[in-house]
Amino acid sequence: MTLQDLRIAVLTQAPRPNIWDLVALILVVGAMVLLVYGGEQTTLPLSALDVAPVSLDPVNLPLYALRTTMRMLLAIICSTIFTFVYAAIAAKSRRAEMVLIPLLDILQSVPILGFLTFTVVFFMNLFPGKVMGAELACVFAIFTSQAWNMTFSMYQSIRNVPKDLEEATQSFHLSGWQRFWRLDVPFAMPGLIWNAMMSMSGGWFFVVASEAITVGNTTVTLPGIGSYVALAIEQQNLVAIGYAILTMLLVIIAYDQLLFRPIVAWADKFRFEQTASGSPPTSWILDLFRRTRALRALTLPFAALNRTFSNLYIVWPEALRVKGKAGAPSRVVDVLWFILIGASTAYAAWRAYRYLSVNLGPSDILLAIGYGLITLLRVVVLIALATLIWVPVGVWIGLRPKLAERVQPLAQFLAAFPANLAFPVFVSLIVYYRLNPNVWLSPLMILGTQWYILFNVIAGASAFPTDLREAASSFHLGGWRWWAKVVLPGIFPYYITGAITASGGSWNASIVAEVASWGDRHLTAVGLGSYIAKATEAGDFPRVVLGIAVMCILVTLFNRLLWRPLYAFGERRLRLG
Amino acid sequence: MLEQVNQTKLIDIRSVCRSFPKGSGEDLLVLEKVDLTIHSGEIVGLLGRSGSGKSTLLRIIAGLIAPSSGNAECRGEAIEGPPNGVAMVFQSFALFPWLTVLQNVELGLEALGIDAAERRQRALAAIDLIGLDGFESAYPKELSGGMRQRVGFARALVVHPDLLLMDEPFSALDVLTAETLRTDLVDLWIEGRLPIKSILMVTHNIEEAVLMCDRVLVFSSNPGRVAAEYKIDLPHPRNRLDPAFRQLVETLYARMTQRTTTKTTAQEGIHGTGIGMVLNHVSSNVLSGLIETLAGPPYNGHADLPVLAGQLQLEADEILHLGESLQLLRFAQLSEGDLVLTEAGKRFAHLETDARKKLFAEHLVNHVPVMGLIKRVLDERPTHAAPAARFRNELEDYMSEDYADETLKTIVSWGRYAELFAYDEQSETFSLENPH
């Protein structure tokens, strides 16, 4: 971009401000002010938290919401950067891929709140006496709930870049760096954005859970919606909880409208299709910015900068080059690489064994596994119950297009809503009616995640081909036959997608759902979630590690032995069209 | 003197071979000892069946894959990676859907580090030349196939390459669009308005090769070799109905079928023998339909391939495919550009469904060795069942995994039609059971 270009752009666009410029300008300035204000708060010393403790006055809620939102924003930026680097390395280097991808697979099944136990201590030590440490720990917790599946999505996209486009970039002499920004990133964009949105839903849950947390002697209460709710629980204030829920609703709607809608609408051009299909997604805010004149002219230098950035002459280091044409990869380096991996693994295993064996005996392990099986039972029963309820409801809604159009956004919204904000309402009821916590705390695990089943089933039923339905009714298929032969196979792949997400979310939620309190009444359901939660509170790291390891193994096995085969079956045999 | 010769020699390929790893151990040879020289000022066509390695050769010249042995040089320098001054047009267009027409065209210039003003000016010139004026800010998905391929041409021409490589550039387009684009390109070429020195194009469309090229190299399959070379010095613009044009098309058809027949006598079987024969999947419906067409008027059992291809709107490659499948099953015979029904073929045309199936089954077992093998194994085993893996492994001794998959798919489809055996996709097993 040269000055001449700029001049051309400025001249041709005649940047006389229009009304849209004014609106957009206010939005931009407002966002910047809020960012700066929120940012200033994080550099305060930790003691400031004690001076100005969280208060239940609803006047403070907008500010708390802002703090919570900023944590989310920071986390999604970190996740995106991590994704670009990690996925690129894993996709470009065969040797790195061997380690990075299995690692990612495991990280995906580690309960997110488990990370928090360690990271709180780590980050607090990094910034002793500053709010920043606690903030970062919280941001990191959200990061862990978003980064893994975003990275997986990007990695898979880069690996599946269409062959002809790849050849075109080579043939036209694009450097590795140019190729990354011109081909890999745009191609990965739609999947990445979809996954970021899904992660966001999970993120709200964890930001709320990690704002008020106790690890051993360290208690952190960061101003935010989560800590507001924690205080409300302590004071048994149901009205305050109602305010918090209302605020959260507004925040999520704002986030969706101001951030994700525009991004989705903008990213529509990255969808890899050769012909335009369906109606493209729209966003009023994107339209607003597109209608502005002066602001658009101002963004031109940024576009130029972006162009220059992606055209920088940077080549991948030799070690990261895609192997393909030039001969077989060196065997010697492979062997050295394997030895290195083997040695590090052995060392890590030895250290872990040394650390854990001092504090834990075989009986501890059996106990943890036993608890794990109890939680597993809860997850299975709850998923089954949710299936029995939501599949018929979802089918009923999905087959009525008018209704589905209205219900679908609601179901997606409910999935994004952090269910833990609503926990106290249920817990107060359990306390009031003196119900058995082992049974009645369980539904909390699926409170937030059941919606994934609902909205996926609605999507499946909406996509069910009309001709098949007509064929079924013309052959007088009815009753259970209609369910078993027509509809259930048709929505199966969708249902499985929803159920996998719901089950993963339930495991994560168990850590906050199996222990609950209302004022000074503490309720506990026996299970792996409460085991980890209690060990965290007591600062008992060996037991936290054990609990997380057991959960990790159970989740992985559950996925490998049940969900993946079902998913593969659904994709192979039952995918319509 | 010697230097002058080198200057006009754009591409020099000497005894180039290329092999790809096969499912089992050994490599599969797709190109064998190919020689090719491209001079300034000519359009050269590589004509051959799919799998004859012509696309592989194009990619070797494009620097996208390396030869296994032999020399590949571009302007006297060995080709290692995409050479400068060579640009490519893709069968699938290979446009970036997230870039506008203008941005797509500018892409190659950006990679060369050309500054923005010149980039814009050259891109607009190329867009203008190729007839895309007014579409600069459109995205590829808003364009028709023909317009998209024009973007593909503009993108390649804008870098002013010495050599333009074209990989079946018109085969993804409908008949009318393809014709317009071909004549537009030839017009620009003879008017000397293209900023290039030579064109190398891969095609399996015989008429297209005769219409556009100064020189055509016919490739034979398995492994790919240059079987013959024809110079075409008809003046441009060429007329498809010109007797000399027709004669050339006939000759090339004959040449392409001739390979098959000489191979038949040489190896006492039909293109590849024994278990290791690659079977291309052709639906039994299509085969039946073709037999009926051949048996009926105006062919009455004897058809000229170009005529038949024209009537059925098939490309040379496709009609040869079908012809070979019929030949393999001894329902017809390919020779000198003709397709002639055998006695069995004529009988087949007049049978009812069940009788057709029986005849088909008989021919399968007798003339397709792998079918005979499967039938024998199933008969001998007490369970009358065998996993597909058993035969797949055997196939992979002779061919790549992709070909083994294709062959297996054909076996299953033909076997099911002939009711020779049943196949369960879930467990991947062949069996003699039939649902009652």
Image (cartoon, rainbow, N blue to C red):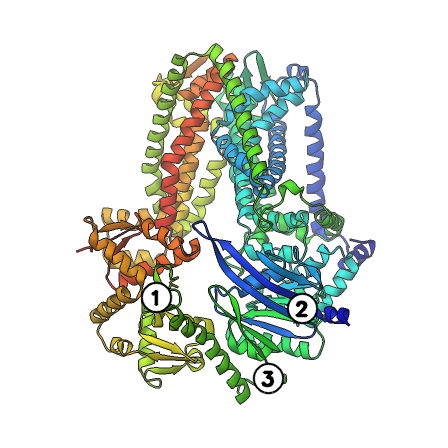
Q: Nearer the viewer, residue A240 or A117?
A: A117
Picture mark count: 3
Label 3 is found on which chain of the structure?
B
**Location of mark 3 (residue):** B238
Residue B72 vertical placement versus A53 (above, below): below
Per the model, the C-alpha gap separating discs 2 and 3 is 31 Å
Q: Which residue is drawn at 63% across and 65% down?
A: B13
Image position of B418 (left or right of B229)? left
Look at the numbered disc 1 and give the secondary structure of its residue: loop
The type of residue carrying mark 2 is Gly
The answer for which chain carries disc 2 is B
What residue is at 43 percent from the left and 80 percent from the top? B336
Say which mark, if any, is on residue B372: none
Q: Mark 2 points at which residue?
A: B134
Disc 3 crowd, CA 10 A, few/some/many (<14, 14-19, 20+): some
**Quick check: marks 2 and 3 in contact, CB under 8 Å?**
no
Q: What residue type is labelled 3?
A: Arg
Measured in 3D between alpha carbons, the distance from the residue under mark 1 to the one under mark 2, in whole angstroms, is 44 Å
Residue B187 position within the rendered picture, expressed as x and y whole percent measured from the top left = 65, 79
The quadrant the C terminus of chain A occupies is: bottom left
Q: Whole-percent x and y of residue B184? A: 63, 77
Does residue B256 appear to the left or right of A227 in the view shown?
A: left
Q: For residue A397, say whether it is visible.
A: no
Chain letter for the residue marked with disc 1 in the picture: B
Task: Report helix, strand or loop for mark 2.
Answer: loop
Question: Of the numbered discs in the image, which one, if any, rests on residue B283?
Answer: 1
Front of the two marks 1 and 2: 1
Asked if labels 2 and 1 touch by Cβ distance under 8 angstroms, the answer is no
